[in-house]
Image: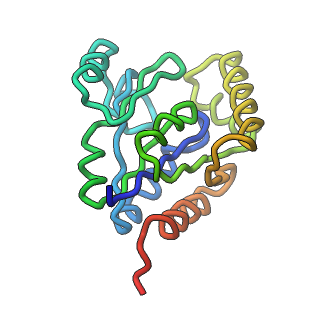
Amino acid sequence: MDGKLIYLMGPSGSGKDSLIEAARVPLRELNCEVMRRVITRSAESVGEDAIGVTPEEFEQKLLAGDFSLAWRANGLAYGIPIEMDKWLHAGRHVLVNGSRANLRQALERYPTLLPILLTVKDDVLRERLLKRGREAPDQIEARLARNALFRDRRATDLPVHLIDNSVDLAQAVRQLLDFIRLNAVPDQT
């Protein structure tokens, strides 16, 4: 494949969707498309620009081979449409909102992918999750505990590029674009 897969991960509430939306136009200038996920959550859910399907529809798409990548997390099913492979083969870079738990599967299929972990301080993450209002406080605390476990394992796990999105979204966008320029865009000199 001539294009690079940019695999953005981070805990729910870290601001992945905000980062993607803020970077959308400059990403296009870098020949990078943003791939919409298929998800078994209502398309009317606030936040992510995803394609909402029922669990039954998701299973049908999975069995039909309509996904490049698919996984389950937090009671939902997620899929990256197979169209992504066409874009990559055509030399376009593709940014996906991926899953930390699915990174190994993604690396097996796309060994040159560029993994990025969006981090956020726990107090900021807790506040964002509470404001979002999708989960009860005990569910939020469980998410924070899972995030801490992942953070503790990360030192011995797969190498990823870290971007902190605790405060300044514009700075996180600059870091994302700089990383892509450095690792995906050929030197123009």
Return the x and y of residue 178 as percentages of the image width and height.
Answer: 54, 68
- Please tell me whether residue 117 is drawn above or below residue 2 in the rendered image: above
| Residue at 64 percent of width and 16 percent of height | 136
Return the x and y of residue 153 as percentages of the image width and height.
Answer: 74, 36
135 vs 53, left or right, is: right
Q: How many numbered dots are placed on residues in this image?
A: 0
Who is closer to the viewer here, 49 or 28? 28
Picture colour scheme? rainbow
Q: Quadrant of the N terminus?
A: bottom left
| Residue at 37 percent of width and 52 percent of height | 94
| Residue at 77 percent of width and 36 percent of height | 152
Tell me where residue 119 sits by quadrant.
top right
74 vs 127, left or right, is: left
Return the x and y of residue 163 as percentages of the image width and height.
Answer: 63, 54
Q: Residue furthest bottom?
A: 189
Q: Residue furthest top?
A: 56
Q: Quadrant of the C terminus?
A: bottom left
Who is closer to the viewer here, 138 or 27? 27
- Please tell me whether residue 19 is drawn above or below residue 107 in the rendered image: below
- Please tell me whether residue 28 is drawn above or below residue 156 in the rendered image: below
Tell me where residue 155 sits by quadrant.
top right
| Residue at 39 percent of width and 28 percent of height | 70
Return the x and y of residue 98 as percentages of the image width and height.
Answer: 48, 39
